[in-house]
Amino acid sequence: MRAAWPAVALAAGGAAAQGITHTVYTTTTVSVAACPAPSTFATAVSSSHTPTTSNSTESSASTTKSATSTASSSSAAASASSTGSLTNAQQVGNSTWGTLSQPTFPKWLDAPNGTKYQTAPWGSNTVKNSDATVIGDVPVTNVTRHYDFTISRSQISVDGVLRDTILVNDQFPGPAIEANWGDWIEVVVHNNITAPEEGTALHWHGMLQRGTPWADGTPGDAQCPIAPGKSYTYRYQAELYGTSWYHAHYSAQYTGGVAGPMQIYGPSSQDYDVDLGAVMLTDWNHVPYFSIVTDVVGTDFSKIPPRSDNILINGRNSFNCSQPSYDNSTEWLGSNLKSSINWTCVEDAPLSKFQFQTGKTHRLRLINHGADGVQKFSIDGHSFTVISIDYVPVVPYTTNTITLAVGQRTDVLVTANNNSAKSYYMRTTTTGGDACGQSSAKEALAVVYYSSADTTTFPAYTSPATPAKDCASDPLPSLVPSYPLKPSSNPYQQDLTLSLGRNSTGNFEWQINSQTYRANFNEPLLYDAAAGNTSNTFETQDKKNPLFNIFDFGSNSSVLLNVTNNTPVGHPFHLHGHNFYVLASGHGVWDGSLLGSANPTRRDTQWIDVGGYVVLQFEADNPGVWPFHCHVAWHLSGGLAINVATRTDEIVPIPKGTREQTCVDWDAYTKRDEVDQIDSGS
């Protein structure tokens, strides 16, 4: 019998959590002997690069130590010491993200057999003459990239605070998935989560899954969860190129550590010298996700939303151990708790490090893989050239700060044109208050070292420029796609209104058109749709099915979503299976006017401000059942999602045995051991 989660009851039509008693424990502060800083990593960029494979670990990872700083979440001074207080393994497991031993990345991958491509494998395609969302533009490479992921529970101290995590291949962030545009990606996922057991599933954020909707990785929609002790193989094509991430889509599990970057190599609008890979930004909580979910679907409004305890860059930051994990300041709407377990904190946890080659231009792949907070990213003394958002190349533009809501990505170029002996702080912060998921932490810091800089010291700390007090996405007029596309005329319009309500038991639930969402793990909607079993599941597009919050758009070729936010917080909304056009955004009620309708911004995740609206349009050219949901983990747990059904009579035949890979095992598991579905399930 598996260990039970906290007892949580779910009422029909919404998540209803029983009250759970928490105990506040005192802090234990410890010191750990430090090791020398790692040597500088190789800086050559080559097409012969070997990807960081998912089924192997770096032998240096367990001994590498990053530099540290006393500039913690609540401190405004940095030390000149380079002594680290945690080993790399204690902080982030086997990960090398954020160390100087992290590899650089290529312009493209060679063939799996080692054959070197003399020219780009996508041929003559450029950002201006082709678009990955246009059927027929995706190159055919006849290559499959193989990955093997084991998901298991661990304890690490990413910021010095020891907590339970769930990791991919014992790494946080998880290993990179790399492929060339047009390659196929195959990932075998093993669920080794124990003490207690959990189901799991992995979603490949932003991938269209055209022709492979069963590989989308959403329990209750595309599959049953992967049962404990079982495995599942995902296979899909890299139809888009650029930067994204994969993450667990089972409850709020990804906020516990199940996340990693995806780097799909393709054309670029501007050349660069060095690809430093992913820069993953996240807020971080010291309390396990299921405790937070229990609070936010409960009856106490003071626990909605929780403020995170810290912010991380590539899985690292330091934390002031004298500061409680849950601040009891009255200005924070959140749980006044430290933890439900004894709290161990190590001072001066290492910061992430990056190395710039003097005079060279570097590509950074920024990803917000957090639970809630809108991130504002900068590097002291440097500006950025933006070349891509989500999976969409854009006309390059220059800025000093990048804003990313949860789920959004931005690829930037930055030139190391300063003193070769200096170092600079990289920063990310959350602003705008609780409506934007602001953290209790002031900022996250990392250090960028130039070629001749002393990597055992830190730059002098200066307070950051005061960031804007809002949490909007970067301005839409700046986000012009490199390849112009015009949305179809006369789309079917669906109005959606976001609200926060209570169900019959008084528990909070997030709603769209007065209806919340709750997955049925044992009956994935895609399989019903593909089999034509829609009588109890789908209705016409002008109605909704309250059981699974489904909107069936039938054979409509294009759909316009007018989304109005009547809640007290903002929401980053993500659509699976499609990119969408962002036609309008503002406050109040949409007046029907459109922005840049000749070539509007395209992406897969868009911020909707407090009291605001956003107008999105997508081409319904990908038959399937696709979630459209808020990417704040706590809001999605509370049911802030719908399912978009398109052209269900055209869903490609699902390969024989696909459903059996997960559902037979999951059915057997749930018959043997009751599963406490503590939230919406997604």
Image (cartoon, rainbow, N blue to C red):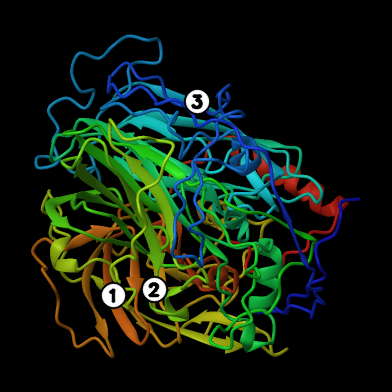
Residue under pointer 3: 53
Q: Position of residue 572 (x, y in %)?
A: 40, 68
Quadrant of the rendering where the C terminus is positioned: bottom right
For the residue pair 410 and 17, the one nearer the viewer reads as 410
For the residue pair 264 and 628, the one nearer the viewer reads as 264
Kind of residue indicated by mark 2: Thr
Q: For the residue labelled by badge 1, is the local secondary structure a helix, a strand or a loop?
A: loop
Neighbour tally class for label 2: few under 14, some 14-19, many 20 plus, Cα within 10 Å: many
Kind of residue indicated by mark 1: Ala
- For the point 59% across and 84% down, the residue is 329
Left/right of residue 602 with respect to residue 239 in the rendered view? left
In this rendering, the answer to whether 655 lies above or below 573 is: above
Left/right of residue 242 with respect to residue 665 in the rendered view? left
- For the point 30% across and 26% down, the residue is 106
Residue under pointer 2: 431
Q: For the residue labelled by badge 2, is the local secondary structure a helix, a strand or a loop?
A: loop
Work out whether residue 557 can be spotted: no
